[in-house]
Image (cartoon, helix red, strand yellow):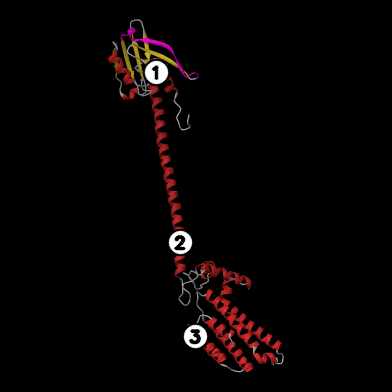
């Protein structure tokens, strides 16, 4: 048997057992003594044995022994009193009462009398009209009604409370979401001092207004990537992120100056008397190396600054570029002193000055062309 298949009740099994044995029975019902099979001639009473799933007959009452049947019907059962000259039989069916009454009226010789009771006299506790029983029954029914009403009311109150709690929770969630959205919109509406959109992650985490490069397809320029780079640099210099951002240009300028000092120091170490060796004076190799290294470093710095500023260069960047290019011009002059002037050097000097002017008006983005010319010197 499947778990989902409902097991038949004892009543169903008993009636099936009776039907298998007595297929002439017109009606099979439950009664006070067990089960009964009723046909046109008699009523046979059975007991059901659950262990063997079978029934056994315990008594039989033939209608021919009776003249009259008095039916007293109640809410859930009926009392049928069969009366004859020598016999009396009380049959109490608990189902199909109307069908049994019709069978007795239409298929037997019995005179059927039906006691008429008001509906409330059919209720348990009111049938005997005993005042004590009626009062007790009334109290019981009142208790049942009140308990039922209270149960319904309590359930409704619980449902209302649950609904109100769900509503409050939903309102809280909605409120938090609205506040979060409002905060995000407020942050997105903020601008830098020069009117540019801000880097939202940086502002949210460190309360710093730094220019955003988004929308962009370049991973290193996305707001999160920029913030992580600042965090890494701040850790390197043992600073907070806001402190590093505020001092970044100073740090970059200091690094550039340090690189220049190291270059000058190396030059002095190679020429302690400020006089180059005969080979350097002949081919200007030192000046060429200084020019190339300065331009290569500057080009890397420019790429880094643009990555931090959304592909643009600010005033501080321009100042460093201007100083570096002038530093390159000084080495070009040294080169002229070493090897003399020529068309390549003159063109290179013109190109450097053109780049200085181009950076000032914002039409130059790197020094890669200068690097190519420097390598050809």
Left or right: 120 as drawn, with respect to 196: left
Which tag, 3 or 2, sits closer to the chain's start? 2
For residue 195, above or below residue 107: below
Q: Which residues are magenta?
A: 51-67
Residue 142: numbered disc: none
Name the residue at 57% across, 93% down.
342
Left or right: 34 as drawn, with respect to 330: left
Q: Give the labeled residue for mark 2.
A: 179
Name the residue at 62% across, 91% down.
335
| Residue 284 at x, y percent in the picture | 64, 90
Q: Which mark is in front, 3 or 2?
A: 3
Instruction: Between residue 229 and residue 176, name the one nearer to us.
Output: 229
Q: Circle 3 — which element?
A: helix
Measure how far apart labels 3 and 2 are at the Cα level. 47 Å
| Residue 10 at x, y percent in the picture | 45, 22
Q: Are marks 2 and 1 in contact (CB under 8 Å)?
A: no
Q: Give the labeled residue for mark 1.
A: 19
Which tag, 1 or 3, sits closer to the chain's start? 1
Measure how far apart labels 2 and 1 are at the Cα level. 74 Å
Name the residue at 70% across, 87% down.
270
- Residue 239: quarter of image: bottom right
Label 2 neighbour load within 10 Å: few <14, some 14-19, many 20+: few
Label 1 neighbour load within 10 Å: few <14, some 14-19, many 20+: some
Which tag, 2 or 1, sits closer to the chain's start? 1
Measure how far apart labels 1 and 3 are at the Cα level. 111 Å
Q: Circle 2 — which element?
A: helix
Instruction: Between residue 93 and residue 223, name the one nearer to us.
Output: 223
18 falls in the magenta region: no
Q: Give the labeled residue for mark 3.
A: 358
| Residue 45 at x, y percent in the picture | 41, 14
Q: Which mark is in front, 1 or 3?
A: 3
Residue 316 seen in this snapshot: no
């Amino acid at each position: 048997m499947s778990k989902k298949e409902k097991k038949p009740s004892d009543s169903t099994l008993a009636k099936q057992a009776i039907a298998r044995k007595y297929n002439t029975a017109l009606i099979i019902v439950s009664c006070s003594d067990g089960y009964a099979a009723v046909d046109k001639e008699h009523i046979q009473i059975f007991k059901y044995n659950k262990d063997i799933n079978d029934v056994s007959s315990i008594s039989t009452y033939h209608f021919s022994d009776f003249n009259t049947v008095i039916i007293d019907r109640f809410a859930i059962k009926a009392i049928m009193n069969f009366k004859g000259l020598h016999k009396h039989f009380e049959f109490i069916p608990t189902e199909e009462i109307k069908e049994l009454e019709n069978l007795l009226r239409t298929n037997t010789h019995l005179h059927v009398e039906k006691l008429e009771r008001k509906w409330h006299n059919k209720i348990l506790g009111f049938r005997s009209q005993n005042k004590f029983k009626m009062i007790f029954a009334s109290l019981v029914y009142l208790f049942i009604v009140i308990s039922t009403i209270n149960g319904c009311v309590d359930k409704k109150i619980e449902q209302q409370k649950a609904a109100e709690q769900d509503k409050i929770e939903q309102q809280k969630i909605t409120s938090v979401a609205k506040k979060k959205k409002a905060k995000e919109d407020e942050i997105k509406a903020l601008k830098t001092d020069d009117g540019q959109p801000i880097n939202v992650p940086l502002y949210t985490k460190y309360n710093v207004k730094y220019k955003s490069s988004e929308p962009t397809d370049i991973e290193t320029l996305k707001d999160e990537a920029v913030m992580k780079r600042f965090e890494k640099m701040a850790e390197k210099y043992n600073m907070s992120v806001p402190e590093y951002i505020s001092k970044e240009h100073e740090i970059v300028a200091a690094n550039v100056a340090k690189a220049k000092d190291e270059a000058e120091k190396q030059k002095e170490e190679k020429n302690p008397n400020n006089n180059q060796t005969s080979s350097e004076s002949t081919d200007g190799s030192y000046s060429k190396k200084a020019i190339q290294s300065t331009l290569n470093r500057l080009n890397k710095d420019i790429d880094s600054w643009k990555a931090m500023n959304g592909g643009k260069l600010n005033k501080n960047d321009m100042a460093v570029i201007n100083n570096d290019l002038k530093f390159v011009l000084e080495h070009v002059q040294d080169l002229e002193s070493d090897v003399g002037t020529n068309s390549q050097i003159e063109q290179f000097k013109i190109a450097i000055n053109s780049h200085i002017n181009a950076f000032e008006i914002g039409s130059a983005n790197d020094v890669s062309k200068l690097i190519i010319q420097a390598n050809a010197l």
